[in-house]
Image: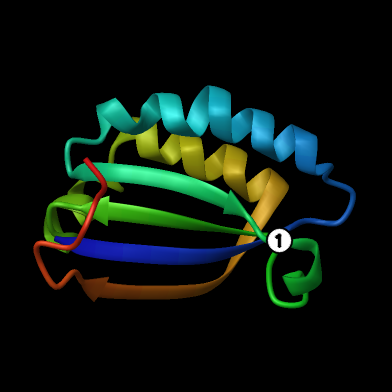
Amino acid sequence: MDVIIHSIRLRPGIEPERFERWVRECDYASCPQLPSVVSFSVQRVSDGDRAAADYFEIITVRDRDAFALDMKSAAFGALVDAFDQMAVVVDERAGIRIEPGYAAG
């Protein structure tokens, strides 16, 4: 599985509460409309580490080609439009998980 990590900086004047509410109510809620997405979460960066970013998101996808198709969907486009009003991706990293990984049962 492919993993994509975005570092995110809020735009000037955007309150963290507004962005986090949108993540909970819209971003997470839209994931079922994107079949390539296996998991998705947004993390607030600790106060001491805010020099580079305010948040980071971790997206696990079945494969990058399938995700690229999902990115062309109306559901994804609506997310991008709303996100762009509040924040900007300042860094992207992507890789392939060394399976199986670990998750507590």
Residue 103, position in %: x, y? 24, 51
The correct choice, above or below, for 58 with respect to 36 in the image is below
Q: Quadrant of the N terminus?
A: bottom left
Residue extending furthest toward the right: 13
Callout 1 amino acid = Asp
Residue at image location 39% in from the left, 28% down from the top: 30
Residue 78, position in %: x, y? 47, 34
Residue receiving disc 1: 54
The correct choice, above or below, for 51 with respect to 46 in the image is below
The correct choice, above or below, for 61 with respect to 101 in the image is above
Q: Is label 1 in a helix, a strand or a loop?
A: loop
Residue 18 falls in image quadrant: top right
Locate residue 18 relative to residue 55 in the image: left or right: right
Residue 100, position in %: x, y? 10, 62
Q: Is residue 104 visible?
A: yes
Name the image colouring: rainbow
Q: Is residue 72 visible?
A: no
The correct choice, above or below, for 81 with respect to 8 in the image is above
Residue 71, position in %: x, y? 30, 48
Q: Quadrant of the C terminus?
A: top left
The answer to which of 44 and 70 lies nearer the viewer is 44
Residue at image location 29% in from the left, 37% down from the top: 73
Locate residue 21 relative to residue 77 in the image: left or right: right
Residue at image location 13% in from the left, 58% down from the top: 63
Mark 1: few, some, or many residues within 10 Å (few <14, many ≥20)? some
